[in-house]
């Protein structure tokens, strides 16, 4: 089915993903593309509007990312945010200079003219700024819409060409009225508000049928929400031509294999092949301490196991995976000049001679959108709201060398964390909560004996989509129960610490 789309040109802002997320919250599909995307390619996407993101550069610096002037001649509304506004001004004949005073963080914005972009925007407003330049003179044909305390041109418009610029970041929740601005832009673009779970499921099923034809598909079933929703989408599209393969790679959570068998094979009646490859994976991981190497090893072995099963099953042509949009964003240069943070199991480490064609029906979704699709497909809420689990599993939560003994310690600690978080009624409101085994031993005392044992770090974060996160303020009595249980019930652990780092600057996982 056709859908209205907003294309976001990414100039390297840390908030680019939030722009996409906010537009989708307003029920309009958005996608991020590099600024090097050609005008022809943009036109082929037939967007209803284009957003130019912020970025860390100055438009007058050598090597700063640029935009083709013809983008502003496509006949669709364009919204420039921060660097995007400055770049629009620079390209179209305005004047941009280094500001006498930089604006980072909270600032006041006052609207001077409530054009359609600022319709029902409450002014003055606290907004979020992140720039060191200012527009001294807007381009010919533009009018000033608003100013901040240090920038006389903090919003501008060319009504005839439907070109808009704002210096603050409406996508950041610190900006009052930010969603109003974005909603107004969508109205200016004439977008239908029909991007939702039901419309996605319908579209995804049609795409899978068109891509797969009469071929058969293997689905990489991990037991998590992503692969489960991917499997159900493929099953709805092609029925019994789907075979799910569950690989026990030795770095799974406690009792994971048994739970997968009960939920998917017995309850949902999917055709699931179980493969115990734990010895193989742990052998390949022996002595590997570098996080990226762990991910690459697991990704490579994962595909090799699938190759072997494919031969046994008669070589299905397609492999289905639960790759999500944040995985794609963080693992590739799709954001143009933005930096690669880390590779992901689903999108990194795939051998070049991969024999399967990939089916990735969730590749354009954020996590909460996957959950909404899961509910639409009939999955129960308890499972749909299961916390995310990394593709490389406990291997990236077992810091340093990975071996069966240390994994067993981590598995038990992780199970205690999950059990106590659920008992406290906090599991749903926390994005992720888990244990990390540190490659550190410390001295302790148990009874009258000296101990020299490992340390467990507890990680719990709150987030909307995993792109940014803040550490969860868990009750002290809850932390005390978790610590007491881990130290008393797991022989080999004598110390528990709590991680109070946010993302950024940290990532959610330790590796």
Image (cartoon, grey):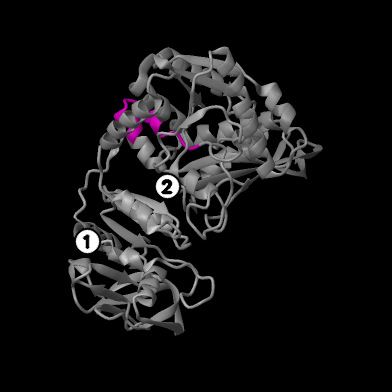
- Magenta stretch, residue numbers: 373-388
Gap in Å between the C-alphas at discs 1 and 2? Answer: 23 Å
Circle 2 Cα neighbour tier, 10 Å, few/some/many (<14 / 14–19 / ≥20): some
Asked if the stretch drawn in magenta spans residue 432, the answer is: no
Instruction: State if disc 2 and disc 1 touch (CB < 8 Å).
Output: no
Circle 1 Cα neighbour tier, 10 Å, few/some/many (<14 / 14–19 / ≥20): some
Residue 397 visible? The answer is no
Query: Where is residue 255 drawn, in percent x and y?
Result: 56, 22
Which mark is first along the chain, 2 or 1? Answer: 1
Q: Quadrant of the C terminus?
A: top right
Please indicate whether residue 176 sits to the left or right of residue 402 in the image.
Answer: left
Residue 314, placed above or below residue 348: above
Please indicate whether residue 417 sits to the left or right of residue 105 in the image.
Answer: right
Q: Nearer the viewer, residue 288 or 482?
A: 288
> Which labelled disc corresponds to residue 158?
none
> Which labelled disc corresponds to residue 184?
1
Classify residue 379 by image quadrant: top left
Please indicate whether residue 10 sits to the left or right of residue 375 in the image.
Answer: right
Q: Nearer the viewer, residue 112 or 410?
A: 112
Pointer 2 residue: 465
Asked if the stretch drawn in magenta spans residue 383, the answer is: yes
């Amino acid at each position: 089915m056709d859908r209205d789309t907003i294309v976001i040109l990414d100039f390297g802002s840390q908030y680019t993903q939030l722009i996409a997320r906010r537009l989708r919250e307003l029920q309009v599909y958005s996608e991020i593309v590099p600024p090097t995307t050609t005008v022809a390619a943009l036109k082929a996407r037939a967007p209803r509007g284009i957003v130019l993101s912020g970025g860390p550069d100055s438009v007058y610096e050598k090597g700063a990312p640029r935009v083709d002037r013809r983008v502003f001649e496509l006949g669709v509304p364009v919204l420039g945010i921060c660097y995007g506004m400055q770049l629009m001004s620079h390209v179209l004949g305005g004047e941009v200079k280094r500001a006498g005073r930089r604006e980072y963080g909270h600032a006041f914005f006052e609207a001077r003219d409530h054009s359609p972009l600022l319709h029902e925007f409450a002014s003055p407003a606290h907004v979020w700024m992140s720039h060191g330049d200012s527009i001294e003179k807007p381009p010919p044909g533009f009018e000033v819409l608003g100013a901040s305390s240090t920038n006389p041109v903090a919003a501008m418009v060319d009504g005839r060409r439907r070109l808009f610029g704002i210096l603050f970041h409406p996508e950041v929740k610190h900006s009052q009225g930010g969603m109003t601005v974005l909603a107004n832009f969508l109205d200016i673009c004439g977008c239908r508000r029909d991007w939702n779970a039901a419309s996605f499921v319908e579209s995804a099923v049609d795409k899978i049928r068109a891509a797969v034809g009469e071929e058969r598909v293997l689905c990489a079933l991990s037991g998590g929400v992503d692969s489960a929703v991917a499997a159900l989408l493929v099953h709805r599209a092609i029925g019994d031509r789907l075979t799910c393969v569950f690989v026990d790679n030795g770095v799974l959570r406690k009792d994971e294999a048994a739970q997968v068998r009960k939920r998917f094979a017995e309850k949902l009646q999917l055709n699931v092949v179980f493969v115990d490859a734990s010895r193989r994976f742990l052998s390949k991981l022996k002595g590997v301490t570098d996080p990226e190497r762990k991910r690459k090893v697991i990704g490579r072995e994962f595909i090799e196991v699938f190759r072997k099963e494919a031969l046994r099953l008669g070589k299905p042509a397609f492999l289905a995976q639960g790759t999500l949009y944040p995985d794609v964003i963080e693992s590739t240069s799709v954001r143009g000049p933005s930096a690669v943070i880390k590779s992901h199991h689903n999108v990194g480490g795939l051998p070049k001679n991969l024999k399967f064609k990939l089916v990735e029906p969730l590749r354009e979704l954020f996590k909460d959108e996957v959950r909404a699709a899961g509910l639409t497909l009939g999955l129960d809420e308890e499972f749909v709201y299961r916390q995310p689990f990394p593709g490389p599993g406990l291997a990236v939560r077992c810091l340093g060398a990975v071996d069966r003994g240390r994994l067993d310690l981590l598995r038990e600690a992780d199970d205690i964390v999950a059990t106590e978080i659920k008992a406290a009624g906090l599991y749903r409101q926390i994005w992720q909560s888990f244990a990390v085994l540190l490659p550190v031993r410390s001295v302790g005392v148990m009874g009258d004996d000296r101990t020299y044992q490992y340390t467990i770090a507890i990680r719990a974060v709150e987030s909307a989509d995993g792109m940014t996160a803040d550490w969860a303020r868990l009750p002290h009595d809850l932390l005390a129960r978790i610590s007491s249980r881990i130290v008393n019930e797991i022989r080999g652990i004598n110390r528990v610490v709590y991680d109070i780092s946010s993302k950024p600057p940290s990532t959610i996982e330790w590796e």
